Amino acid sequence: MKLLVVEDDETTGNYIARGLREEGQSVDLVADGREGLIQATTGNYDVMIVDRMLPEIDGMTLVKTLRGAGNRTPVLFLTSLGSVDDRIDGLNAGGDDYLVKPFAFGELSARVAALSRRPQAMERESVLRAGDLEMDLIARRVTRAGQTLDLLPREFSILEHLLRRKGRVQTRTMLLEAIWDISFDPGTNVVETHISRLRAKVDRPFDTELIKTVRGAGYRIDA
């Protein structure tokens, strides 16, 4: 996952970033709300961790601004403001979860993981594209370089999921939950099998590979 941490306390920010990086996450750390807003609008993040009391722009304003601009990246508020009213205000401002300081890193990590698995409210485009690949969601038709591809329903769903998250790695667990509605590892290679079949139709007959394997992480479609 790619995460953005907006935390003005240097010790806390470094502690969070170090712990998440040790778990294999990619983390950008900034110390004020203005820089956080810039990073959030120019980066492609899976989850943001935002303190409420920030210099330049406070966390509530930061998140409200992002939501007003259509940014739906999940936000975990991490703050010392822990009253019921504070939590309600944070969630009403557009936060998806709320964790009060002091906190246990294990709980923070678990909440971030849960947010990353939550389907985001995405714009429902009628046509999705990547390179010379085009998916018409209304006609349920996929073409590449003008050639129609005959996809089975599950293959269509996997490809749609990857196209909607173009440029972002989707793990095996994410695909199991999104496509098969399975929240545990069934101990089979069902994901790998379907990805292989999808590649045989989407990539193999063409010069350029679109469905990429990110070693040790999952799968991704690049533009």
Image: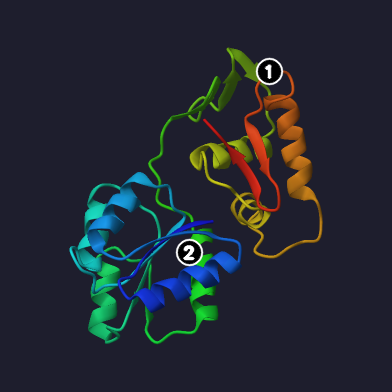
Q: Residue at x 76, y 37 (%)?
A: 196
Residue at far right of view: 188
Indicate the position of residue 164 as horizontal and vertical percent values.
49, 40
Q: Which residue is mark 2?
A: 115
Looking at the picture, which amino acid does disc 2 mark?
Leu
Relative to 9, residue 176 above or below: above
**69 sits to left or right of 209:** left
Q: Secondary structure at mark 1?
A: loop
Q: Quadrant of residue 198?
A: top right
Relative to 144, residue 6 above or below: below
Q: Which mark is residue 207?
A: 1
Residue at far top of view: 146
The residue lying toward the viewer, choosing from 147 and 52, is 52
The residue lying toward the viewer, choosing from 28 and 91, is 28
**193 sits to left or right of 140:** right
Indicate the position of residue 27 as horizontal and vertical percent values.
48, 60
The residue lying toward the viewer, choosing from 35 and 74, is 35
